[in-house]
Each structure stands twice: as C-alpha cells, then as structure tokens.
Amino acid sequence: VAPGPSSPSPPARPPSLPHTSTNARTLGPPEPEGHAGGGYPTYTNVEVVNDGAESAAFKQLFRIWSEKRSRNRQLGRIDKLIHVKLDVGKLHSQPELAAQLRMVDDGSGKVEVWCMQDLRRQPVDPKHHRQLCAGNCYLVLYTYQRLGRVQYILYLWQRHQATADEIEALNSNAEELDAMYRGALVQEHVTMGSEPPHFLAIFQGQLVVFQEKAGHHGKGQSAPTTRLFHVQGTDSYSTRTVEVPARASSLNSNDIFLLVIAGFCYLWFGKGCNGDQREMARVAVTVISKKNEETVLEGQEPPHFWEALGGRAPYPSNKRLPEEVPSIQPRLFECSSQMGCLVLAEVVFFSQEDLGQYDVMLLDTWQEIFLWLGAAAGAWKKAVAWGQEYLKAHPAGRSLATPIVLVKQGHEPPTFTGWFFTWDPFKWTHDPSHKEVVEGSPGTALPIAEITAQVNSFRLSKGPDNGRAGAIALQALKGSQDSSENELMRGPKSGGVSSTSASMNGALPREQLMHQAAEDLPEGVDPARREFYLSDSDFQDIFGKSKEEFYSMAIWRQRQEKKQLGFF
C-alpha cells in the first residue's frame, strides 16, 4: 500500500513477488528527475483495485484476507464438511475437495516410521508409531490406493531448531527412500507444531510428542516423575498432544491437559473446552499412560494437583477466537535461477498444459507450498530451498513452518491436482516424450528436424464462444486453445508430405523469419510456427536449446520465448 503525500520519504522496498503476468517484466533505469507524490519515481507502476474485485496478487500482500459473507458460501460448505466423517470415495473422485481439506484419504493406509539417529534412519517399532520425541527428526511413509493405483507420501518431520546437519541427513535419507521407490514418493516437509491434517489423521488423533523419551529411541534417559501434556483438537485430523513444562503457567482455559505423577493421572478440563475436545482427549491419553485417571474441572482442582505443578500461577484464560482460514486463490509460478537468485514468473489462469517436463513450478495455496518437478527438470535438488526463499521474501510475512511439498511429474496427489480447473491423470502416462525421460529409452522417436508436414493445413481452433464470463470461462477457453496449439506445436502425427514444406523445413535464413509481419514471410511459412523453419544450428544459436527441448516446454513458455526473440 503506497503511503500518502505527507510521507517524507519512500519506505524501504520490501521483498516482493513478481508482477502477475506470464511475461517477465523488468523496470527500466531510474529517471534522473521527476518523482510522483510520496517520493516515488515517476516510472512506479500504479494499479487501481476495486472493492470486491481484488486480484490474488493483491490479497497475498496481507497476512489475513476476509471475504464478504455473501461471497464465502462455498468455503462455508467446505468448513461444514470438515466436521463430518470423511468419505474416502468422495476424496478420491473429487480432487477439488481433497485439495480444500488437504486430505488424500482418511489416513487408514499403511504407515512406516523411521527415527533419525546419528544422521541415519532407524525403523521405529509399530507399537511406538504414535510417540515422537521433540529432540529427533522423523521420516513417515504413508502408502495408500487411489483409483486402483498405489501412491505414496513421505513426510519429513522436523523438530524445532533442527541443525543444518540434521536437515541435510533428513533430506539425504528421503532421497534414498525415493530412489528405492523409483521416484514415486511425494515428499512433504513438516515442522513440529504445524503438521497438516492428513499427517495427524494417519495417527488417528493419537499423536503424542514427548520432550524426552526413555527406551525406544535408545538414549536411556529416565523419564521425569511429573509430566504435563497439552491436548488440542476436536477430531482425528486436528488433534495433537505435546508435552509442555510441568508448571501451572502452561495451562490454558481453552484446552485440556493431562498431568502424570507417580502412580496417578489428572485429566484437567478447561472451562472453554467443548465435548469434542473432551472425547478426543480421552482417546489420546491412552497413548501416554495406562494409569487410573481422575477428571478435574477448572476451578475444582484438589491441593495435590497444584502441589505437583509447583503451586498456583497465572495462565491464559481469555476465550480463544476461532482461527480464520484466509480465502486466497492459488497462484502458480515458474521457478528459475539467474546469477544465483531465485526468479519467479507467474502464470495466470493456469492449467495442466502450463506444466512442462523441463520446468520447476511453485504452486502457492497459502496453507501449503507445492514444488512441481518436471521429469527432466535439472534443478529439483534446489526446490525445497526455493520454497523456503519464497516464504522468507513474501511481503505478507508468511510462516516459515508452512509445509513444503515436492511433487514429481506423473505422481501428483489429489491435494495438488484439485487446484487445477481440469486434470488428466493419464496425460503423461501415454505421452512418449515423458516415458523417454522416466525410462531412459529413446524408443523410435525421430528428431524434430526430420519431421515434415503441410503446415498450411493447420488452423488454430478458437474454441467455443458461448458468452461465459469470469475466470472459469477464461480458463476453460484457454485450455481448449492450448489443446489445439499443443498439437500444432508438436508437429503432425502422420499423413502426406508436401514437397514445398519439405524443402523449406529447417532451411530458411533467420533474417527472413525474425521480426517479420505475417504477410512478409516466405510463401508456405506458417506465421504461428515460423521458428520451425530455422536450421538446427540457427535454432540452437537463437533459442539456446534444441528443437526437441523447445517443443517439449509448456505452450505459454514457447510463446514467451518467441515474443522475446521476434518469432511471434
């Protein structure tokens, strides 16, 4: 938000996200004189935003953005769904629901847990799966079936203030597991205290984080005689229990606490807790202790209760306001690195067609950051660091504990695909170019330079025009156009060959093709594919890549490079 005219000097420019355009924009050099009000230079971009029509880029400048009630009905329906029993069938058949709830299923799949010890992973006994230690990092592998296909999620659970060596070891062991599963693992980086709903669901609301754990981690510490556990949550996918310092100031009137002392337990109910919280607490405490427990209501504690906590002390008692989930539209960015700096280019009205096998794409859904890795992407090891850099630079002051999810081409979970208007799960399964990258076998594909066709017969389909308006209509129309353009860009599948096009293919000098109006092009050259008529050497020199690499990119990226180089 620009300051008013009374501001003495412009504020320090905060790190900002790229301009919301598919084309990268670079501001020109500062003009020597002439500044706008408030001390800003005259070349500063000014955007007028109308109430109720704010763009996603504008909304993300604020930490919290509340939609008007009348326009938030759909989110309200989703909020109601989250309080009823999850229907796995609906989550599988409706990826948009899975994306909104951040749940691929109800957590009833297979679970394997490894604890990081001495920078190596050690398997955890299944009977201790629900018991984590705040001083360790963990790998949690979840296996489930969706639409008849086995899929995997590998959670990398990181403790608070983990060292660089611990984080590196966690990532290294995750890579080893991913290699064992031939790159099929979706990897989600999770920080203690910021676990997503599905992570909690796989422990069925019984996840307990101990400060120190004797025995099963092999450290051999003796557990303290008095321990206090904070229970939060109302259902199996929001409940976690964390050990806190055993003193009265740790209590909170809105929640439930379990006080464990020698031979006895107190289950303390704060005045602000509800019936769902009490029900989940009774389930969670069975993981901690099998001792007899006495229910204690706030204000009716026996003297022994306060003695175990070292005496009475003030603690939070104000009613907790419900946490507001921001209703912000997802944003998709292409990631690249220039001179060691992360560069993001936003794709507006994005679709599956905008994902190419050489790309690293960042999808920001606000509650999670997805890094989509094309099958031939060369910078995938930098992806997590890019996600963290994005969060640090975000002008809204995003939490660095926001989960970061690595998704590889062909292994997209519904929590990712549900953010797209349409998604074809078989698009890359039947794509020969994708199979070549994944399987490493070139097959019988011919070089692009050898493909010839009657390009004059191609016409770009404009898609239906039925008067629909709004983002959904634009997105659907763009998908229709991209589909037609995709076939055009890839060249003909089969058919006769024209001697004219055959003689011209890859044989025209660059001067006759670059920066030329359509009517000035040589006869028989398709204006939409003029770059195709360059020789292989000229194409490599101008575009910096081969024709095979160029035509495997997303359509929007092809257009972007052609505009920049004078072939559009």
Image (tube, rainbow, N blue to C red):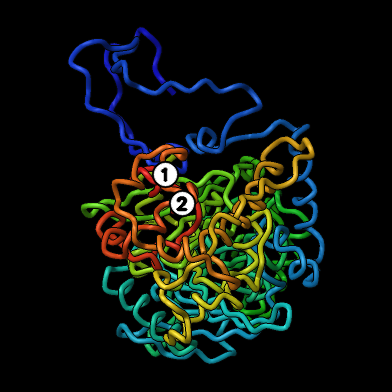
Helix, strand, or loop for circle 2?
A: loop
Residue with the mark numbered 2: 525
Residue 540: where, in percent of width, then height? 28, 62
Image height of 445 relative to 562, above or below:
below
Image height of 313 relative to 151, above or below:
above
Helix, strand, or loop for circle 1?
A: loop
Residue with the mark numbered 1: 521
- The residue nearer to you, when weighing 375 against 148, is 375
Q: Amino acid at mark 2?
A: Val
Would you identify the image quadrant in which residue 520 lies?
Answer: top left
Residue 44: where, in percent of width, then height? 35, 22
Distance of label 1 from label 2 (alpha carbons) = 6 Å
Which mark is drawn over residue 387? none
Could you tell me which quadrant the N terminus lies in?
A: top left
Image height of 348 relative to 286, above or below:
above
Question: In this rendering, does residue 191 appear at all?
Answer: no
Q: Residues within 10 Å of mark 1 (few under 14, many from 20)?
A: some
- The residue nearer to you, when weighing 82 against 304, is 82
